[in-house]
Image: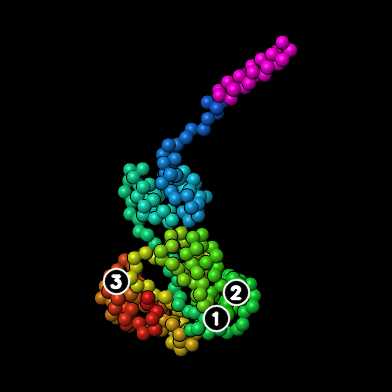
């Protein structure tokens, strides 16, 4: 009898606590946005932050509230945009993009103005007289972009970063860390791109790098669609006009257009 009474008391207390928790869960329940849940499921879960929000949950919440467009998920690409658009009942056009580095200067074809033995970072090196290269516009090659890439799409070889087109998701993180602003996002299917950013003239640009644009305008002359223009002594391509004919590549004797 002495044992039964405590057991009954404990059981009653447990029952009361259970009922109390059940009632509290109903009264204090946070409403679940079913649309937001579906949107979250449509995202890849990379949580890279490339969309400008604090991960996939934040982006899904912003879409559900009408504060964000459905095409900002770079890792998910066109597939994620289409899935989100279907949930929202809207149409969306999403072109896959990848990172492009507007510089082909390697240690072999660029010249240096001093020896650098400091912190192995583009940002740090660039603070000392614009970096150790003769070309003040060129890639410093210390791999800040490669280190920040969450997908391992960028590797550095011979002082120049290279983007793997099959891995790059176009998240844009590399564009933000390049101190020379050499990296941009271009359409994945682009057929021609100008890999030089040096805006110097004549002898100066030739002296600095063996694969620099000399603003000869041959690419501009042969382009029948008007997609190539030489601006500030460097070739610039309008991808919306480019037909991919390849004539600019053939005309460029310094192989700036790739």
Label 1: how many residues lie within 10 Å, few (<14), some (14-19) or many (20+)?
many
Q: Which residue is mark 2?
A: 125
Q: Farthest residue to the top: give it.
A: 1
Give the residues in magenta. Answer: 1-23
Disc 1, SS: loop
Residue at the (37%, 77%) spot, across then down: 257
Residue in the picture at 47% in, 61% down: 172
Q: Residue at x 55, y 24 (%)?
A: 22
Q: What residue did someone put label 1 on?
A: 133
Q: Is residue 6 shown in magenta? A: yes
Q: Which residue lies under the disc numbered 3?
A: 244
Q: Measured from the top left, where is residue 178 in percent x and y?
A: 52, 68
In whole angstroms, how far apart are the C-alphas of marks 3 and 2?
37 Å
**Residue 186 figure quarter:** bottom left
Q: Percent position (x, y) of residue 91?
A: 31, 48
**First of labels 3, 1 by sequence position:** 1
Q: Is residue 28 left or right of residue 89?
A: right
- The secondary structure making up most of the magenta span is helix
Q: Nearer the viewer, residue 85 or 225?
A: 85
Q: Quadrant of residue 2?
A: top right
Question: Residue 194, position in %: x, y?
Answer: 39, 75
């Amino acid at each position: 009898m002495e044992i039964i009474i405590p057991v009954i008391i404990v059981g009653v207390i447990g029952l009361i606590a259970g009922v109390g928790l059940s009632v509290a869960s109903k009264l204090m329940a946070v409403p679940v946005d079913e649309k937001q849940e579906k949107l979250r499921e449509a995202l890849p879960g990379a949580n890279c932050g490339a969309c400008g929000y604090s991960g996939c949950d934040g982006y899904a919440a912003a879409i559900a509230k009408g504060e964000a467009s459905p095409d900002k998920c770079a890792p998910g690409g066109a597939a994620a945009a289409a899935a989100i658009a279907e949930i929202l009942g809207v149409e969306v056009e999403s072109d896959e993009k990848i990172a492009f580095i507007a510089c082909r200067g390697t240690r072999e074809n660029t010249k240096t103005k001093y020896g650098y033995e400091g912190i192995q970072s583009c940002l740090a090196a660039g603070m000392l007289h614009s970096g150790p290269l003769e070309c003040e516009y060129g890639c410093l090659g210390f791999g800040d972009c490669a280190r920040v890439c969450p997908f391992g799409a960028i590797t550095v070889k011979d002082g120049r970063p290279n983007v793997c087109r099959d891995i790059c998701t176009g998240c844009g993180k590399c564009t933000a860390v390049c101190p020379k602003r050499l990296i941009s996002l271009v359409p994945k299917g682009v057929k021609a791109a100008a890999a030089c950013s040096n805006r110097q003239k004549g002898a100066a640009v030739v002296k600095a790098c063996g694969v620099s644009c000399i603003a000869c305008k041959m690419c501009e002359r042969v382009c029948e669609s008007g997609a190539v223009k030489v601006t500030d002594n460097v070739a610039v391509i309008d991808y919306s006009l480019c037909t991919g004919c390849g004539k600019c590549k053939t005309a460029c004797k310094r192989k700036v257009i790739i």
